[in-house]
Image: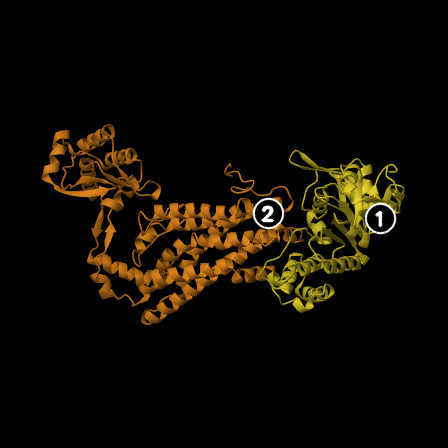
Chain colours: A yellow, B orange
Amino acid sequence: MDNNIVIKNVDKFYGNKQALYNIDLTIGKGMFGLLGRNGAGKTTLMKMLAALHQKKKGEITVCGIPIEKAGQIRAVTGYLPQDFSMYPSMRTDEALEYLGTLSGMKRDELRKRTTSLLARVNLTEHRHKKIKQLSGGMKRRLGIAQALIHDPKVLIVDEPTAGLDPEERIRFRNLLCEVAEDRIVILSTHIVGDIEATCEQIAIMDEGRILWRGTVSELVKNAEGHVYTVNVEKKFMPQIKKEYIVTGMLAQTEYATVRIVSDQEPDLPNAVLTEPDLEAAYMYCLHSSGCDVKGGEE
Amino acid sequence: MLFIKECKKLFRSVTFIIYSVLVVLMFWTQYWDVLDAPLNETACMSYEETKTSGDPELIMPAALDSLTGCYLSNSYICYPYGFFKSVHLNSSKSKKIQKYITELSGLSSDEIEALKDQNDKFYTSYGTTDYEEYNVKDVPLKKDVTYERFVEIMGDVNDILGGGSDYKPDALAYNFSQVKMTEEELKEQYNDFIEKDHISIAYGRLFSDYLGIDLAFVPVFVAAALITADRRGKMKELVYSRKVSSFKLVFTRFAALFATMMIPVLLCAALSAAKIMYMYSGSDPSFTGFFAVSGAWLIPNIAMTTAVGMLVSEIFSAGAAILVQFIFWFGSLMMSDAALYGNIGKFTFICRHNRLMYRADFMANYDNFVFNRVFYLILSLVMVLLTVFVYELKRGGRFNGIVLFGKGGIFRRKA
């Protein structure tokens, strides 16, 4: 059986407005990051893969199943939406069992799976708590558990770390990496740090188009020669931000060390070519693709 | 397993608890007193019961007297679409009524006017206006007027008045031919109660009459709350992305709604049947008869109200479902209130029979009753199928529902 997700020439419209343009992607086992700004079309693509949206044109197969066979697609995919909750007065384990039942699981299998998944997402001691008593981080972990309850071949997670504190975010990323060992996990996010910590294969989306597709190291390599650090007096910062894409800034008393992205060597004294990090590489990718990048501009 | 989980969700919901309280309240306040003491033959024979005779010889003079009185005071009471309306005609329409009275009585316009002085006068207020009304009696009826022509005239009068009047042809018998039952008829009625209704069937009809009013509206709250729970709980996409088919999910939810909402009804019915068995222990009442009649009567009410709640909530919102069902309920109630017993039309959603006796009146409409209940049961299943269709569209992102009010609503107030 085919274990890839194959997306070929896919277009999507909302009424007259085109949301996706000619999307072409092949996604294999392991973690796959879909990076892009808000409104890039990531959620639309995620929902299409979960059979929750229709495409206008093109072909999508998930593990060899055409996307039109929604029932079969839903049987092999687990989906964690960006903004979700569960019935507030339901207990944690009950909520999992309810969603497992909707996935067609039998009672005994469901009970075992619920217990093991709650343990895996560190919620065993909270299994009898009501959903409304869980913190944001706990709800996200429960979200992963519900998406995995029927042991899907594909896990689709949309902006899962938004709003989480750093500790929860790290815990969540580790969890995703663990579950990606034996399935496809697609992580859609606008947070570069999440991708950097979890994914090797990535795609960058903007305004409904795939701008870049490859590995993280290839993306970083692509930006080599275009990222500089420069020490400038703080009073010149507004001008710097206006003229360059600023991806980082370390402010001192009078001076600031600024990391900028530029096609050419910047016309600034003390500008030093530096190794790009993923954030800078991402910004360079957007910039070189003709996107209106406002990194650092106030 | 899904059915049990949906039932559990319902048992915990506030709307289901409120529903149960309302059912029990209706049962307790309206019906329970009927079971205070058993009916016996002596008591039944002493009742001053009336029945609808339908005899044209009674209908025609009574209706003519009534019409003449209303004409003289130019004040008519109508219930178009079940709503009370005080009607006062302009001179041209009044003239048409006068012509009909002349045709039926042979009295000229002046002679009709003269009846004002020959009959009792009283005053009635509608709004801020006082109307002089006349209790007219013994208006002569021409001998050559056939009943067919009379009914035709009454139909025209009803149209002139805007409908819903006492002169509506199919209401003439009920309004103008009530006669006191004879001793034999009272005896026959009691015998029907014992022998044909096996006691409990008569009580079952009355039980259903009261609870039917509740169950034609209140279930919509429970259904709408369940259907919109996924949206309110931000759980919609978690449910949409599951393997379960839309058909299985929607029908399981319908079945769960139906089953849970039947529980308080069955408990009330069981309590009632048990009391009947105890009260009439010497008369061998039927235990199952009570459940058979109330089941056949009330199941379509719950099914239909639930189906409306599910479908309209899925297309629009819970609020719209409640509004739609309220209009349907109120309209049906007003129409069926015109006659509280034996009033069962083919499409009357709320069937009424607010009497313990009068089996014959009920049986006169029995075919209508059977058609009516089967019709609403089938209609409810069709509506659930439509809900499956709408749910499947929404689930696949092909339809997002119709927003009526608020952000993006089609009736959004412009700033």
Residue B84 in the image, given as x and y percentages of width and height: 30, 43
Residue B230 in the image, given as x and y percentages of width and height: 59, 53
Asked if both marks, 1 and 2, belong to the same chain, the answer given is no
Q: Residue at x 52, y 57 (%)?
A: B257
- Disc 1: CA contacts within 10 A as few (<14), some (14-19) or many (>=20): some
Task: Looking at the picture, tell me which residue is in the foreground, B393 or B148.
Answer: B393
Please give the residue where the numbered disc 1 appears in the rendered image. A277
Residue A210 in the image, given as x and y percentages of width and height: 78, 40
Q: Are marks 1 and 2 in contact (CB under 8 Å)?
A: no
Q: Read off the chain for label 1.
A: A
Residue type at mark 2 is: Tyr
Residue type at mark 1 is: Asp
Image quarter in which the C terminus of chain A is found:
top right
Residue found farthest to the front: A254
Residue B120 vertical position relative to residue B242 in the rendered view, above or below: above
Residue B287's quadrant in the figure? Answer: bottom left
> In the drawing, what numbered circle is on residue B408?
none
Please give the residue where the numbered disc 2 appears in the rendered image. B391
Residue B120 in the image, given as x and y percentages of width and height: 12, 43
